[in-house]
């Protein structure tokens, strides 16, 4: 019997939760008992939209244009992906740095009443005629989804008119899912349907698909490629800084892995079903434990278990004396971590390498994979708070102000304004992953703790937009079970 096709909405999978405030021990016990329930917030301070993730996942593809069928504001958050793309070009030695080619149809009130299909049709035609791209990604939005504009039909019509450009409609309406990683799935589902088309091609010996999100630095890319190269693998690094040709090469791989476990995990399942490509589903390679686990995972898939143990032993011999020095600088320091699901849990394991203590953890989603990580963290850290939240900085400000950790690892702006030393974990400009990234990140955290002057002075002159009374409230008072 054929399996049910995945919808691209992560809530359609059982046991995924995205609104909860608790402790590490309680969330582990309640998940085991099946007592966790879907919740909501009576007040929410903005959510990360899945449309942004669908766009950011692909915006560095060569010879591509991106048409957002939306109001103009919907592409505002792409500024981060644009910045990563520009910086990444500089790091790769490109002299003529470009912006991604983004066109927005600018839906307005008239479009909502009368429909916006004509705007979309004209926008796609202008994009193709202006840039002559090999592929055109057409993104839906909340507005176009609500009014029912048929982006598939328009893409089909224009595919006949422009046969040299692959038209790829992507259904990433923000209201479909509160789990922002659903946006990655929407993009990959469209790639499979309109580019790969379930066509099986001849396998390339030793080829491994390495899926990487926007926030992976060039240094991290080189580190992952170095590690896979030591196993004799050839790397197809996708989709960041990729191309249509590299996308079409995906089915030729003998195995797949991802740098971020929530980025391409659903797509790798699809690749195994449609193209017989086994995959390694492990962790984000941040810190010694997680890097070892990630490395062993892909080595097992490609039959290199013996070789990987020899490499890991050599890497440990090289880095452990350096980690010991970092531990002397960081031992006993308390830290709060805020990032994506993969990075939060990976960074929480990383700090154990340095003898640091976990005070609190924010993660956008909680599921069976997160449960494995929490069980591990509960074994090495005593008591820590868990905030399951897509964004919601008002909760994290409240928690951090109460917990007063020595350091904050995450997206640092609001924590810096509290005067706490901060280190950016979503840093697509500097190394954070693998054995070499571990050392860089550890030194960066230690340096911030040693010299927190900027953050301290910032807190004396900048006030966050919350009343003093909020800091005395329960941080989770707006979560409704």
Image: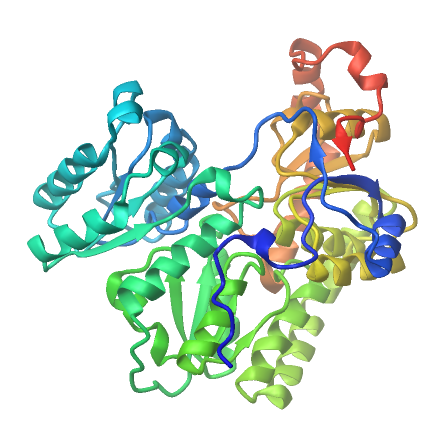
Question: Between 316 and 342, which is closer to the camera in this rendering?
Answer: 342
Q: Residue 315: in sight, yes or no?
A: yes
Residue 460: give x, y in percent of width and height: 71, 11
* Residue drawn where x is 29% and y is 36% of the image: 69
| Closer to the camera in the image, 345 or 395 | 395
Residue 442 placement (x, y as % from top left): 69, 50
Q: Residue at x 41, y 77 (%)?
A: 274
Residue farthest to the right, as pictured: 382
Across and down, in percent, residue 189 comes to 40, 60
Relative depth, front residue between 177 and 217: 177
**Residue at screen point 35% across, 72% down:** 250
Image position, residue 365 (x, y; %): 66, 48
Q: Quadrant of the C terminus?
A: top right
Between 32 and 336, the one nearer to me in the picture: 32
Q: Is residue 223 above or below residue 27?
A: below
Residue 213 visible in the snapshot: no
**What kind of colouring is applied to the model shown?**
rainbow
Q: Is residue 36 above or below residue 40?
A: below
Q: In terms of image quadrants, where is residue 124? A: top left
Left or right position of 179 against 321: left
Query: Is residue 88 placed above or below 166 in the rendered structure?
Result: above
Q: Quadrant of residue 372?
A: bottom right
216 with respect to 194 (left or right): right
Q: Residue at x 53, y 76 (%)?
A: 279
Q: Is residue 300 left or right of residue 347?
A: left
């Amino acid at each position: 019997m054929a399996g049910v096709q995945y919808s691209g909405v992560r809530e359609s999978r059982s046991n995924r939760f995205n609104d909860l405030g608790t402790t590490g021990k309680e969330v582990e016990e309640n998940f085991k008992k099946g007592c966790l329930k879907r919740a909501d917030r009576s007040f929410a301070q903005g959510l990360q939209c899945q449309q942004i993730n669908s766009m950011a996942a692909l915006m560095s593809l060569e010879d591509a244009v991106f048409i957002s069928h939306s109001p103009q504001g919907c592409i505002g958050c792409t500024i981060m992906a644009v910045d990563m793309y520009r910086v990444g070009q500089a790091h790769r030695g490109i002299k003529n740095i470009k912006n991604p080619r983004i066109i927005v149809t600018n839906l307005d009130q008239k479009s909502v009443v009368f429909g916006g299909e004509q705007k979309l049709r004209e926008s796609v035609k202008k994009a193709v005629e202006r840039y002559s791209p090999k592929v055109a990604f057409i993104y839906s939005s909340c507005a176009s989804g609500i009014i029912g504009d048929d982006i598939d039909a328009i893409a089909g019509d224009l595919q006949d008119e422009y046969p040299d450009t692959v038209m790829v409609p992507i259904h990433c309406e923000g209201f479909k899912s509160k789990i922002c990683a659903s946006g990655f799935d929407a993009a990959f589902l469209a790639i499979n349907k309109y580019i790969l088309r379930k066509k099986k091609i001849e396998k390339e010996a030793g080829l491994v698909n390495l899926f990487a999100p926007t926030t992976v630095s060039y240094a991290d890319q080189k580190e992952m490629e170095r590690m896979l190269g030591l196993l004799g693998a050839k790397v197809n690094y996708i989709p960041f800084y990729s191309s249509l040709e590299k996308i079409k090469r995906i089915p030729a791989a003998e195995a797949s892995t991802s740098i971020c476990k929530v980025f391409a995990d659903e797509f790798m399942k699809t690749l195994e079903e449609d193209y017989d490509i086994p995959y390694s589903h492990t962790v984000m390679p941040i810190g010694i434990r997680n890097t070892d686990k990630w490395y062993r995972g892909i080595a097992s898939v490609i039959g290199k278990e013996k070789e990987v143990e020899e490499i890991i032993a050599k890497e440990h011999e090289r880095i452990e004396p350096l980690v010991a020095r970092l531990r002397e600088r960081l031992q006993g320091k308390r830290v709060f971590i805020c990032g994506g699901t993969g990075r939060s849990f990976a960074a929480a394991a990383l700090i154990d390498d340095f003898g640091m203590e976990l005070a609190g953890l924010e993660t956008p989603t909680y599921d069976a994979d997160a449960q494995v990580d929490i069980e591990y963290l509960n074994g090495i850290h005593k008591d820590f708070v868990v905030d399951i939240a897509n964004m919601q900085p008002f909760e994290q400000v409240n928690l951090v102000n109460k917990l007063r950790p020595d350091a904050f690892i995450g997206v640092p702006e609001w924590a810096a304004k509290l005067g706490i030393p901060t280190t950016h974990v979503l840093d697509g400009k500097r190394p954070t992953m693998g054995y070499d990234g571990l050392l860089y990140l550890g030194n960066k955290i230690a340096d911030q703790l040693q010299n927190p002057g900027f953050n301290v002075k910032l807190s004396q002159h900048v006030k966050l937009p919350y009343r003093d009374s909020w800091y005395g409230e329960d941080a989770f008072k707006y979560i409704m079970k």
